[in-house]
Image (cartoon, grey):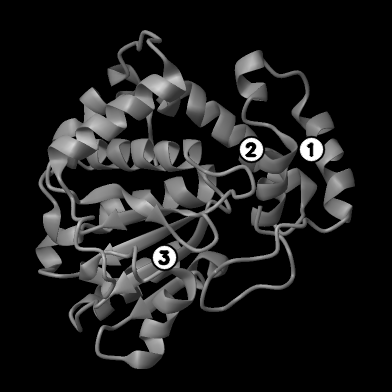
Amino acid sequence: MSLGTKSSSSSGFENTSPPEDYLNKTNEVRTLLGPLTEKSSEYCSDAAITRYLAARSGHVKKATKMLKETLKWRIQYKPEEIRWEEIAREAETGKIYRSNCTDKYGRPVLVMRPSCQNTKSSKGQIRFLVYCMENAIMNLPDNQEQMVWLIDFHGFNMSHLSIKVSRDTAHVLQEHYPERLGLAILYNPPKIFEPFWKMVKPFLEPKTCNKVKFVYSDDNVSKKILEDIFDMEQLEVAFGGKNSDSSFNFDRYAERMREDDLKFYGNTPVSSNLSSFDQLRF
């Protein structure tokens, strides 16, 4: 949980102790939620409710409404039923993948490479992002609830980005995964990215914007952000680290994800989600 008052502006890591009044507010949210199904209860732990409270600055009714919307979304979209085979096509180029390493705080790292975009379906791209988010969350250590995004702009041009996908990404992240993002590092974004950032920024809440850090390989000051949160021996060479064995390999990564699917979900049969695609609106 990321609710403490002390935080590092560069690491995005915050004290995990929630404000004392949140303990009482958690019970208030539970009362307003009313009876829940066994499935919905899985997503309403004290830690989860606290994250929704944090996202709504401790406002009980707003946090409850937000959580209810997420429960409704999960019933329709069924993110826990997405399996590797469904989204493997999206993953072929390594445009999003969970790194082998974590940061110094144990946070999972999602590496993103916009220049590796290989599909045109915005629904498929969001479906893939949700799968990656769910996988990162399932791999969180017991004492951690957040992740880090490392966004590599090597080879980037404006054709690789979509306002719609960026807007939908912001919506899913902020509305259904509140306080899951600890830090987003934009590595070597080119000048042409600046106008796009100005267009996307209004879709982001101020708290989310504050978690976005620009890092440039030729700027020692900004590079220190990476050095503060990563063991540089483990970080990919592409981000200035010394690990040359951690580059993306589709076959190896596919094996990892299949193993994760089996470990976390077993052989649970998965129903078709095509109707959920059609029902979903951002």
Quarter where residue 125 is shown: top left
Residue at 14%, 68% (x, y): give it: 158
Which residue position is annotated with label 1? 29
Whether the residues at callouts 3 and 2 have beta carbons within 8 Å, the answer is no
Which residue position is annotated with label 2? 67
Q: Position of residue 104 (x, y in %)?
A: 50, 64
Residue at 41%, 68% (x, y): give it: 231
Q: Position of residue 23 (x, y in %)?
A: 86, 46
Nearer-N-terminus badge (3/1)? 1
Left/right placement of residue 221 relative to residue 188 reads right
Q: Position of residue 42 (x, y in %)?
A: 63, 25
Q: In front: 70, or 102?
A: 102
> Which element type, helix, strand or loop, lies under badge 3?
strand
How many C-alpha atoms fall within 10 Å of the one at disc 1: few (<14), some, or many (≥20)?
many
Which residue position is annotated with label 3? 184
Whether the residues at callouts 3 and 1 have beta carbons within 8 Å, the answer is no
